[in-house]
Image (cartoon, grey):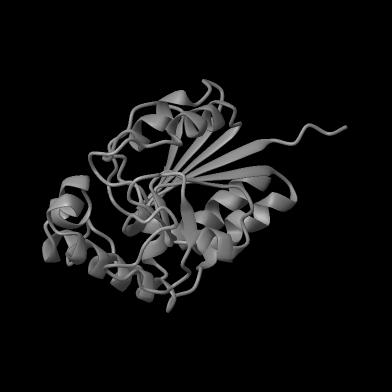
Amino acid sequence: MKNIKKIVALTGAGISAESGITTFRDSGGMWEQYDVMEVASIDGWHKNPQLMLRFYNERRKQLGEVEPNDAHRILAELEKDFDVTIVTQNVDNLHERGGSTKIIHLHGELTKARSSKDANMIIDVGYNPIEWGEKAPDGSQLRPHIVWFGEAVPLIAKAAETVSNADILLIIGTSLNVYPAAGLVGYAKRNASIFLIDPNEVAHTGSNITVIREKATTGMVKVKNLIYD
């Protein structure tokens, strides 16, 4: 039986930006419009939950208006010949809609809500708003199913194990600035082939990393050709 190579793709905001998802970090991004601690931290939730709900309702509405791009679709196509797992920092569902079937959402999922008291009480909300006063089954206020600053990242250990088994690691559209996700690269095997796709300069260590200074869509075309070469 043929040994199928394992590909793990670590994806960040850059892959979704090409679909029209507003990023935090880029010029004109959300960090210029909002104080990140007001809309992306657990302290912000305790301070002003209604602002947080409005912010994520806007993000959810925007998500329903965009489509996956070629980078998402190429990752899905690779499943025909490889065992592909996506480890994403993004909270959108563009990987799913692009056709990928194995996705680890490190920072939660925008189309889901959960209890304010029980992190395991999760419900699908699709692209609908979460209203102030809307309750989870346990009677607590529904909140976005997002991992905020100040909260633990429950799936980080699973992601680290997944990366450690990769034959090929793709790093796509992430600045490698946000931990613990940025530390996942350190779990890669010594003999793993690592490709870093980003149009910007990204600080990294390791001579075995092939850097492709391209946006996600054109970069993934090049990576696909290299992988099949």
Q: Nearer the viewer, residue 172 or 129?
A: 129
Say whether residue 78 is left or right of residue 96.
Answer: right
Q: Nearer the viewer, residue 26 or 97?
A: 97
Residue 33 in which image quadrant = bottom left
**Residue 20 at what x, y percent from top left?**
37, 72
**Residue 14 at what x, y percent from top left?**
36, 57
Question: Relative to residue 189, is residue 132 depicted above or below?
Answer: below
Regarding residue 218, the answer to whether it shows in the image is no
Q: Residue furthest front?
A: 139
**Quarter of the image that includes the N terminus:** top right
Q: Residue at x 13, y 62 (%)?
A: 34
Residue 98 in which image quadrant = bottom right
Question: Relative to residue 121, is residue 71 depicted above or below?
Answer: below
**Quarter of the image that includes the C terminus:** top right
Q: Residue at x 53, y 66 (%)?
A: 70
Residue 25 in which image quadrant = bottom left
**Residue 129 at what x, y percent from top left?**
36, 73
Exactly how many numbered labels are in the figure? 0
Q: Residue furthest top?
A: 190
Q: Nearer the viewer, residue 164 or 218?
A: 164
Say whether residue 69 is left or right of residue 145.
Answer: right
Say whether residue 74 is left or right of residue 153.
Answer: right
Q: Residue furthest right?
A: 1
Q: Residue at x 12, y 62 (%)?
A: 32
Regarding residue 97, the answer to whether it shows in the image is yes
Q: Nearer the viewer, residue 34 or 154?
A: 154
**Residue 57 at what x, y percent from top left?**
31, 70
Q: Residue at x 74, y 47 (%)?
A: 81
